[in-house]
């Protein structure tokens, strides 16, 4: 009996950590990306899991390079060059992959 309770407790704990991370990713996205990428919902949910995996590859280098190459993204380079961006990658990853188009998940609130 004790074991079961412990397992339930640990699972709940693991879930709340993941949820907190997804939420953080969403908040960072709203702060740093929304200005150019419109509504968070659409931008995030219209890309598939595999597409997001590709954008998120190499610890954020792929996304960095996309913005480095795009003229209209110049304003975002200060952020993409910062260590903040690198530190946020984990949360972006949790957020984007949770709501990729083929997961069927929709962010509850913006
Ligand atoms: C200053 C404007 C700007 C900001 C801020 C910005 N982006 Fe972008 N982003 C762009 C532009 C411009 C492109 C290139 C579009 C193209 O070349 O097709 C792009 C492309 C992308 C792509 C490639 C896929 C696609 O739909 O074009 C991803 C993924 C992406 N951005 C994610 C992000 C994330 C995550 C953030 C926040 C950390 C962010 N962007 C912040 C301007 C911006």
Image (spheres, rainbow, N blue to C red):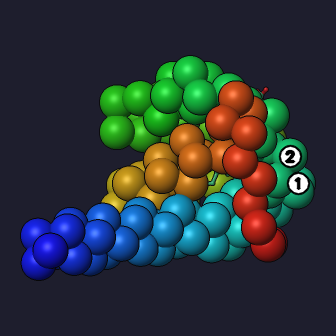
Q: Nearer the viewer, residue 94 or 15?
A: 15
Task: Please identify the quarter of the rendering in which residue 44 is found.
Answer: top right
- Write down the residue under mark 2: 42
Q: Foreground mark, 2 or 1? A: 2
Where does the image place residue 9, in percent across and percent down from the top left? 26, 76
Q: Which mark is residue 102?
A: none
- Write down the residue under mark 1: 38
Task: Please identify the quarter of the rendering in which residue 28 is found.
Answer: bottom right
Q: If the picture is divided into quarters, which one holds ligand 1?
A: top right
Q: Nearer the viewer, residue 109 or 7?
A: 7
Q: Residues within 10 Å of mark 2 (few under 14, many from 20)?
A: few
Where does the image place residue 67, in percent across and percent down from the top left? 62, 37
Label 2, label 1: how many angstroms apart (C-alpha)?
A: 8 Å
**25 is higher (above) or lower (below) than 16:** above
Quadrant into which the C terminus falls: bottom right
Q: Are marks 2 and 1 in contact (CB under 8 Å)?
A: yes
Q: Secondary structure at mark 2?
A: helix
Where does the image place residue 50, in percent across and percent down from the top left? 56, 21
């Amino acid at each position: 009996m004790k074991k079961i309770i412990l397992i339930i407790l640990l699972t709940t704990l693991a879930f709340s950590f993941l949820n907190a991370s997804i939420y953080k990713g969403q908040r960072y996205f709203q702060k740093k990306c929304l200005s150019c990428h419109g509504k968070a919902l659409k931008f995030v949910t219209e890309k598939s899991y595999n597409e997001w995996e590709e954008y998120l590859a190499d610890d954020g280098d792929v996304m960095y390079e996309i913005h480095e190459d795009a003229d209209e993204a110049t304003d975002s380079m200060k952020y993409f060059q910062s260590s903040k961006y690198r530190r946020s990658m984990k949360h972006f990853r949790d957020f984007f992959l949770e709501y990729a188009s083929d997961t069927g998940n929709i962010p509850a609130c913006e």
